[in-house]
Image: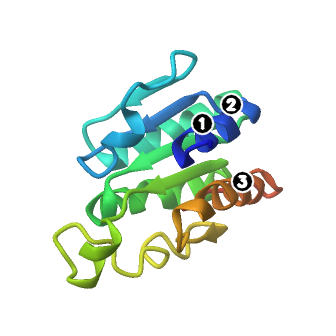
Amino acid sequence: MTSVREATFELFRAHRMTTMFGNPGSTELPMLAEFPADFTYVLGLHELVVVGMADGYAQASGKATPVNLHTAPGVGNAVGGILNAQANKSPLVITAGQQVRPQIMIEALLTNREATVGPQPYVKWSFEPPRAEDVPGAIARAIHHASLPPKGPAFV
């Protein structure tokens, strides 16, 4: 059985999205463990910088570009860059980590409450998959929305 992680990397690979930008936290580390050899991860020290680098890369390459942010604080730090990416019509596929479901109920630190609201209105599409098995479909839709003219960021 293919894992969510494997399915996500396969989607990125199929769309030639093998350069990923991010500033991960502990929530996102499982996604980066044993990172695929055919991918490049561009690490930044702050989410605004990460989105800015991805924005420039997407403009230069013409390709949809994956960006990985660290839960709610990362999304908050990145909003100015997301606004710029929207203005530049850059096709970014932005993902953000989330606490495990039991932690969301108690609103543990770093819980991304109303996760889809944070990046709005600066993204073309924003969705929080309710189940792990919904992640690949959500990523596919985000790639689709980000790549449709006028191009722009999408958020999962």
Between 55 and 101, the one nearer to me in the picture: 101
Task: Report the residue marked by disc 3.
Answer: 140
Task: Report the residue marked by disc 1.
Answer: 9
Label 3: element kind: helix
- Residue 116 appears at what percent x and percent y? 49, 75
- Residue 136 appears at what percent x and percent y? 64, 54
Give the amino acid at mark 2.
Arg
Q: Which mark is residue 13?
A: 2
Q: CA distance from mark 1 to mark 2?
A: 6 Å
Residue located 69% across and 59% down the image: 137
Between 16 and 147, the one nearer to me in the picture: 16
Residue located 20% across and 83% down the image: 106
Circles 1 and 3, Cβ within 8 Å, touching? The answer is no
Mark 1 or mark 3: which comes first in sequence?
1
- Residue 128 appears at what percent x and percent y? 52, 71
Residue located 31% across and 66% down the image: 72
